[in-house]
Amino acid sequence: MFDQLGVVYAVVGAALAALMAGIGSAKGVGAAGQAGAGVVTEDPSTFSKVLLLQLLPGTQGIYGLLVAFVTLNKIGALSGNLVQIDGATGLMLLFACLPMAIVGLISAIHQGRTSIASIGLVAKRPDQFGKAMLFPAMVETYAILALLISILAVNGIPV
């Protein structure tokens, strides 16, 4: 049996990417949903606009899940054929997952806050929905950059 420490590190990295980005998304979507429910209570016609704004912080959880799948696939965990990797390679995979884990957590929370502000804008000026979407979309840029670096880093590590 080969040394499993490298595999453990890689799985921890995958778990952190999914877990931390998922927590951030849950917090962001939850907070925006609370604000959105209040707005829709006052004006039900804003539901579709408010829903789109609420859903934006949920993308980081999806990105974290994607990084986790890429990492687990890289080490053979999804096929049931684990590859033999040393501790150093496992640590590299863990560190490659951290950009998505950390940026996913933080950006989803901040995107949720920005979505709340945009929901307030839609409540007062429904005709400004396009502008309201831009504010939380700007936060998304950093989640996409973290996704890109994590995927490139994971794929660039030879196993």
Image (cartoon, helix red, strand yellow):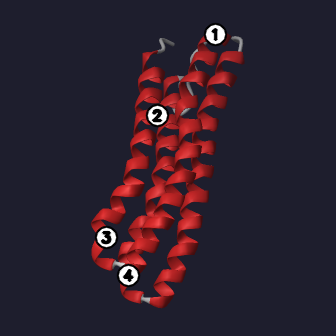
Mark 1 lies on a secondary structure that is helix
- The residue that mark 1 highlights is 88
**Residue drawn at (59%, 58%), measured in percent from left and top?**
26
The CA distance from mark 4 to mark 3 is 10 Å
Tag 1 and tag 2, C-beta contact below 8 Å: no
- Pointer 1: residues within 10 angstroms few (<14), some, or many (20+)? few
- The residue that mark 2 highlights is 146
Which badge, 1 or 2, comes first in the chain's sequence? Answer: 1
Which badge, 4 or 2, comes first in the chain's sequence? Answer: 4
Which badge, 3 or 2, comes first in the chain's sequence? Answer: 3
Q: Which mark is residue 31?
A: none
Mark 4 lies on a secondary structure that is helix
Which badge, 4 or 3, comes first in the chain's sequence? Answer: 4
Mark 2 lies on a secondary structure that is helix
Q: What amino acid type is highlighted by mark number 2?
A: Ala
Please say if 158 is above or below 81: above
Q: Quadrant of the N terminus?
A: top right
Q: Which percent across, then down, holds residue 14? A: 59, 33
Q: Nearer the viewer, residue 145 or 131?
A: 131
The CA distance from mark 1 to mark 2 is 22 Å
